Amino acid sequence: ATIPMLTIDGPSGSGKGTISLHVARELGWRLLDSGVLYRAVGWVVNQEGIDPADHAAVTACAQRTRIEFVAADDGSEVRVLVNDEDLGSQLRTEVAGKYASAIAAIPGVREALLQLQLSLRQAPGLVADGRDMGTVVFPDAPFKVFLTASVAERAARRYKQLREKGVEVKLEALQQDLEARDARDTSRAVAPLKPAEGAVVVDTTGLSIDKVVAKVLAVVRG
Ligand code: C5P
């Protein structure tokens, strides 16, 4: 029997991470934050001084990078080990996101990360968030959501998150970065960001987390 799952795709700052976490907890399902995989490879590429434009070198790097998810006993937090190293919040930085987006356009990188993603579909179910979860990686998922929000709202959310962490950023620069990343993610030849066929589009602009979680849960529970 196929294992039930929900895909949540959408642009940067649409709230995928937060919503996926809440929905997975509510359903008691596992969680795959696929962006972490691209961030991990981007991080290693940067660390090893590999030229992101050298597709063969970046692909080889993706193939040899070991990424492991270690779940806490209560299932609340998942630590990510990259070549046995816990990078903590380093993977969450804007720089890591930029690198991720650059190397994610390379077909060999996406192929190298495919098997790991497929292997995480385990009972009792999986919530997978990213850009191509419903379109490429899990096209047969029974439940699919596409989260969006206005670019102004997405930039404002990121801004708030970063300021709370004590990171100094300019809202305008942040919005420009978001737009550049969206443009790259939407226009790339492989696995471009777009709603999967049959996906329920949820615009989160002006909605509270609780409201969005309820809408997404309704997709699964009917
Ligand atoms: O979602 P997150 O911001 O962590 O993703 C970082 C980058 O990784 C995205 O900008 C995107 O280019 C890439 N990505 C992807 N496919 C996914 C998840 C993330 O290409 N499924």
Image: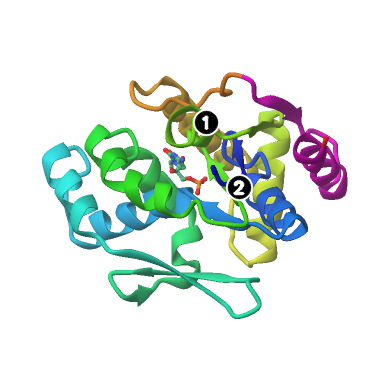
Q: Which residues are magenta?
A: 198-221
Residue 219 x/y as whole percent: 77, 35
Residue 190 x/y as whole percent: 34, 25
Q: Colour scheme used in the picture?
A: rainbow
Mark 1 — residue?
A: 140
Q: Is residue 54 at least partly visible in the picture? A: no
In the rendered image of this protein, does residue 210 appear above or below residue 153? below
Question: Which residue extends farthest front?
Answer: 1
Q: Left of 45 or right of it: where is 172?
A: right
Amino acid type of the residue tagged 2 in the rendering: Lys
Taking the spot 71% from the left edge, 47% from the top edge, the residue there is 157
In the rendered image of this protein, does residue 5 appear above or below residue 222? below
Amino acid type of the residue tagged 1 in the rendering: Asp
Mark 2 — residue?
A: 170
Dot 2 alpha-carbon crowd within 10 angstroms: few under 14, some 14 to 19, many 20 or more? few
Task: Write down the quadrant of residue 191 in the picture.
Answer: top left
Question: Was residue 194 drawn as part of the magenta stretch in this picture?
Answer: no
Dot 1 alpha-carbon crowd within 10 angstroms: few under 14, some 14 to 19, many 20 or more? some
Where does the C terminus fall, quadrant-wise? top right
* Numbered disc 2: secondary structure: loop
For the image, the number of numbered tags is 2
